[in-house]
Image (cartoon, grey):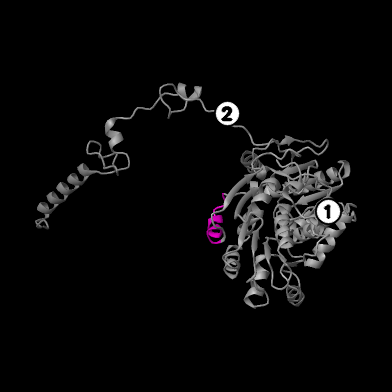
């Protein structure tokens, strides 16, 4: 690994920005990405969340723009991200790193007035950080223009595909010049939809796999608590918040209604908590995140909209109130803690219907998850019942061993003729007409008696 940022020969103003941010030496992703990006190579990078990849693409971009100035022109770099929170987080990084430069950057996302964003674009910022949907609207209405674009960055590309932005991303690529440099960052490069984008985006890219997502994060401990139902989970969560030592806690739920319910419960229990989900407008989101950063609240209950992009100092505790739907979602949730070398803790409340998913996530990410018990709030659910292996009869893999009662019971014998007639309609037996319900002898006797009576009366027997 490169020992110092000075090895990259960055301008003095960027070195001062790095010192202001507290960067002392490059992370692994920065050490590998920055030199290649400075050489103008297209990159396809897989790196775990919290590994420092934001600075890995911002620093070479800013260095190029400072070395080659353009007095006039449009946007020179575009950073596409899946969520508003991630966009604002990258902008905050830029403002810190570029605080001693004259470079400019703007954010274009949904949830803000279009007129305000059009005014931002008229300033011709060198770097534009945007979500795909809103940017494509402005491109189609000719309020945005990418003809001068030199660098295109796709951050959290797998998340954009999961959110259904593939077609929007492809349309934005078509608006940009083909001679640009392109950088793609993704938690995994095995996403089935990535090829659809990379074929249009990248030209002979260099592929870097750094900090594979399935390796355990060395600074995060993983625990789980067994729960019986949502009401039981709420009591366990309250105990954790009242008794565990932490600075800031992020609680994840799978639905907006779930987040609202947990948030209302915590607020009623005198916890300084707030709720963050996708239906809140941008102003309210910014207010809530500001309260968390300043210490106005210490618990944030959120849906997965906050799983990407939140980088808040002091976030030392992540609780999965609802278990995430996949291993990748678990990774991004827990990646909100243990960032930049700090220690973090991730705890999951696991109910009876979530046990199998927890085991699948642990296998997928190769995690060691420590059981954690809360005295007085133990769950009746103690994990799945283990089935006893079924013994098999020697010499036959298909037959089970019969019980003693079955062995002692005399076995009914079946004749071959009976086996052949299984499923067929049984015909009346000719040897037992009485059992079959027929009386042929009685009918013949009656017929003879009728014929004798006819002869005696002189009448002719009817034919």
What residue is drawn where x is 73% and y is 44%?
27
Could you say where residue 367 lies in the image, as x and y percent from the top left? 67, 38
Q: Return the residue nearer the eye: 89 or 416.
A: 89
Label 1 Cα crowd, 10 Å radius (few <14 / some 14-19 / many 20+): some
> Secondary structure of the magenta portion, mostly?
helix
Circles 1, 2 touching at the beta carbon (< 8 Å): no
* Circle 1 residue: 16
Question: Of residues 358 and 436, which is closer to you in this image?
Answer: 358
Name the residue nearer the viewer: 141 or 410. 141
Residue bearing mark 2: 388
What residue lies at 72% left-to-right and 62% top-to-bottom? 65
State the image quarter where residue 82 is shown: bottom right
Q: Position of residue 305 (x, y in %)?
A: 72, 58
**Alpha-carbon span between mark 1 and mark 2:** 66 Å
Q: Position of residue 427 (x, y in %)?
A: 26, 42
Q: Is residue 461 visible?
A: yes
Q: Position of residue 115 (x, y in %)?
A: 75, 77
Q: Nearer the viewer, mark 1 or mark 2?
A: 1
Q: Quadrant of the N terminus?
A: top right
Does residue 250 appear left or right of residue 417 in this picture?
A: right
Residue 274 magenta? no
Is residue 416 shown above or below 74?
A: above
Secondary structure of the residue carrying tag 1 is: helix
* Residue 307 in view, yes or no: no
Classed neighbour count for the residue bearing mark 2: other residues with Cα under 10 Å, few (<14), some (14–19), many (≥20)? few
What segment is highlighted magenta in the picture? 190-200
Q: Earlier in the sequence, mark 1 or mark 2?
A: 1
């Amino acid at each position: 690994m490169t020992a110092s940022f000075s090895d990259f020969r960055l301008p003095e103003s960027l070195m001062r920005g790095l010192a202001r941010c507290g960067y002392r030496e490059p992370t692994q992703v920065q050490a590998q990405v920055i030199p290649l990006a400075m050489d103008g190579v297209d990159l396809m990078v897989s790196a775990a969340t919290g590994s420092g990849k934001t600075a890995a693409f911002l620093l070479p971009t800013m260095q190029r723009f400072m070395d080659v100035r353009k007095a006039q022109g449009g946007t020179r770099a575009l950073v596409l991200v899946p969520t508003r929170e991630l966009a604002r987080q990258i902008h905050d990084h830029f403002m810190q790193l570029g605080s001693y430069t004259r470079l400019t950057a703007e954010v274009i996302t949904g949830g803000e007035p279009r007129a305000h964003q059009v005014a931002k674009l008229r300033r011709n910022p060198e770097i534009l950080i945007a979500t795909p949907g809103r940017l494509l609207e402005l491109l189609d209405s000719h309020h945005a223009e990418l003809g001068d674009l030199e660098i295109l960055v796709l951050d959290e590309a797998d998340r954009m595909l999961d959110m259904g932005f593939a077609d929007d991303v492809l349309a934005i690529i078509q608006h940009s010049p083909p001679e640009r440099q392109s950088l793609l960052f993704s938690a995994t490069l095995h996403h089935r939809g990535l090829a659809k984008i990379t074929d249009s985006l990248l030209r002979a890219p260099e592929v870097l796999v750094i900090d594979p997502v399935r390796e355990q994060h060395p600074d995060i401990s993983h625990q789980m608590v067994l729960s019986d139902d949502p009401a039981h989970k709420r009591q366990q969560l309250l105990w954790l918040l009242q008794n565990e030592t932490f600075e800031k806690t992020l609680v994840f739920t799978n639905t907006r209604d779930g987040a609202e319910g947990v948030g209302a419960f915590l607020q009623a229990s005198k916890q300084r908590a707030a709720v963050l989900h996708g239906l809140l407008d941008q102003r309210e989101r910014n207010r809530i995140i500001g309260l968390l950063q300043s210490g106005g609240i210490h618990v944030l209950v959120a849906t997965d909209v906050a799983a990407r992009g939140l980088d808040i100092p002091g976030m030392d505790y992540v609780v999965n109130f609802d278990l995430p739907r996949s291993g990748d979602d678990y990774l991004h949730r827990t990646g909100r803690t243990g960032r930049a070398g700090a220690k973090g803790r991730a705890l999951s409340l696991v109910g009876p219907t979530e046990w199998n998913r927890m085991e699948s996530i642990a296998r997928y990410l190769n995690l060691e998850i420590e059981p954690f018990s809360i005295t007085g709030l133990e769950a009746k659910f103690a994990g799945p019942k283990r089935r006893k292996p079924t013994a098999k009869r020697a010499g036959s893999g298909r037959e089970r061993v019969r019980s003693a009662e079955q062995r002692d019971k005399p076995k009914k014998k079946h004749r071959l003729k009976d086996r052949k007639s299984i499923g067929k309609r049984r015909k009346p037996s000719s040897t037992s007409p009485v059992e079959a319900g027929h009386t042929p002898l009685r009918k013949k006797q009656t017929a003879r008696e009728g014929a004798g009576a006819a002869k005696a009366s002189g009448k002719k027997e009817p034919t």
